[in-house]
Image (tube, coloured by chain):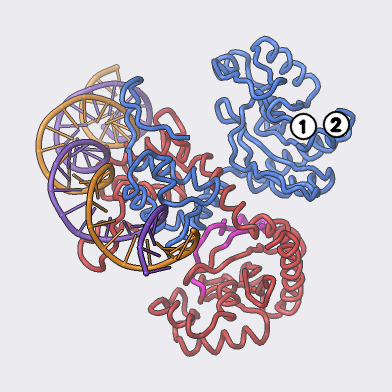
Chain colours: A blue, B red, C orange, D purple
Amino acid sequence: MSNSTESTGAREPASVQSVDRAITILELLARGEMGVTEIAAELGVHKSTASRLVYTLQARQLVEQHGERGRFSIGIGMLRFAGAVAGQLDIVQIGNPVCEELAERLGETVNVAVLDSANAINVSQALGTSAVAAQNWIGQRTPSYATASGKALLAYTPPGELDELLAGELVSYTARTITDPQELGEVLKRVAEDGYATSFEELEPGLHAIAVPVFGAGQDVIAAISASGPAYRLSKKRIPEVVEELRQGARDLSDRMAYAGR
Amino acid sequence: MSNSTESTGAREPASVQSVDRAITILELLARGEMGVTEIAAELGVHKSTASRLVYTLQARQLVEQHGERGRFSIGIGMLRFAGAVAGQLDIVQIGNPVCEELAERLGETVNVAVLDSANAINVSQALGTSAVAAQNWIGQRTPSYATASGKALLAYTPPGELDELLAGELVSYTARTITDPQELGEVLKRVAEDGYATSFEELEPGLHAIAVPVFGAGQDVIAAISASGPAYRLSKKRIPEVVEELRQGARDLSDRMAYAGR
DNA sequence: ACAAGTTGTTCCGCGAAGCGCAACGGAGGG
DNA sequence: CCCTCCGTTGCGCTTCGCGGAACAACTTGT
């Protein structure tokens, strides 16, 4: 949240202050509407400063003002960039229809995720049929060791890199989160053997997820597909069924990616 | 592109310079990879300035560096915002599956667009089956009077607002672009009667498009669905067939939006 | 193979640009 | 109808960010 100016410490090449603040504003607004005063308080700056930053973002359509003098929220202009990043990562576009189909077939929320250093990032999503308005996970950075997708991705990473990647990262989110490096290693080995990974309440209480890897042209893993839902519905019993469906989707996605040329 | 500092003229409340530049960088990178020097030249600033701006964006994952010292491109962090804006505009999420289905049925690229002042902005997209790697239109701001979607949206706007909206906007893109306000008025009236709009090479030579409006809860138009493709394939003859499919999709989308609660 | 041309990054001093302050004007709410 | 809270706008001071130049790591040309 409010990470103010860190004057001393590590020698980071120094960021441009106002740009950094502007990005923070965008991240705040990504979570919901806010007023200028609220933003200023969160940033730890004066109202006027926040106002001008917001104005700049608004002039470029990155934020929108709801009334003439109302609150602010993320703007449509952001979609332009969204389209660009989606265009660069073919998997985003190609993953969407696959997600849709799986979501309909399983009735659960389905995501495609890729690995970015220690985090798994969801790049595509399709909501399940359940009426419960599920959370939007797109773009979310989730700790790889605590999610099904993450573990599916990590399982095929060389152990050497792995230790480096997760050094000092193993924070506990629930009672079931794996925090012991050695235990994690064993679990990942098992994942590689079985060809699927699970996360049963390791990230959030009551949240279950099952994931399988998506292979690229060679033997490398380029993504993971996961199904997630409430614990009472996505039980252990359903693993074989769900894994089977996910595998089919993963194969489908692999093929489409190969066809697309990458 | 390079809009430098305009010292004189209208009294705009003044933007924060570095933030404005940073956004320009993002827009540049949205079109493809670039190097720092290239960016600096485009912005009209010194390399060092560009380097620091890019570093700031990179630290927040909004841009990525391809090698250790390579070129830059839009980063995955952008997806976080994309998810946020998609969450706020329900139509983005709901529109996607509708696009997919229509695209498969028609074999052409299908888009959902909304109106933003004088521009039509594509918010959802599904590519057609044709092997031709079509352009990514998501987030694109297109001149409403020259696109099928745009005209479908404008046709239900009160004439008063319309004149104000398009004052001095009617630029010509091709020989067929409508640049006469009176002619546009007549065309739009026709669109409202027929219930569909076309753009045959009015935006780009060789590009045809057909669109229908999407109605909200009342009689208001909240979006438009369009099919677009090369002139030789999406000919006038196909209008009845395509319009019929699009109408069905629009009704579907309307229903789903109503069901979703907005 | 070396040199000359790139590239992107870092250090530093000056100046403008952006910040905080305070006053303004409108919108609700009591 | 006053009082409070909101977002916006001049204004002056200081800081922050810019430009210049030197640097280091690659690529190219001969």
Q: Is residue A145 magenta?
A: no
Across and down, in percent, residue A171 comes to: 60, 20
Question: Which residue is label 2 attached to?
Answer: A235
Q: Residues within 10 Å of mark 1 (few under 14, many from 20)?
A: many
Q: Quadrant of the N terminus of chain B?
A: bottom left
Position of residue B122 relative to residue D20, above or below, is below
Q: Which residues are magenta?
A: B122-144
Position of residue B67 relative to residue B211, above or below, is above
Q: Secondary structure at mark 1?
A: strand
Task: Name the disc covering residue A208, or none.
Answer: 1
Residue beneath the point at 80% across and 48% down: A130
Q: Secondary structure at mark 2?
A: loop
Please identify the dominant SS of the magenta region: loop
Residue beneath the point at 29% across and 63% down: B12
Residue beneath the point at 68% across and 18% down: A178
Across and down, in percent, residue B187 comes to: 56, 86
Given the image, what chain letter belongs to the residue carrying mark 1? A
Q: Is residue B124 magenta?
A: yes
Task: Kindly indicate whether the residues beneath marks 2 and 1 are on one polypeptide chain.
Answer: yes
Judge by depth and name the residue closer to the eye, B89 or B193. B89
Q: Earlier in the sequence, mark 2 or mark 1?
A: 1
Position of residue A99 relative to residue B197, above or below, is above
**Three-letter amino acid code at the position of disc 2:** Ser
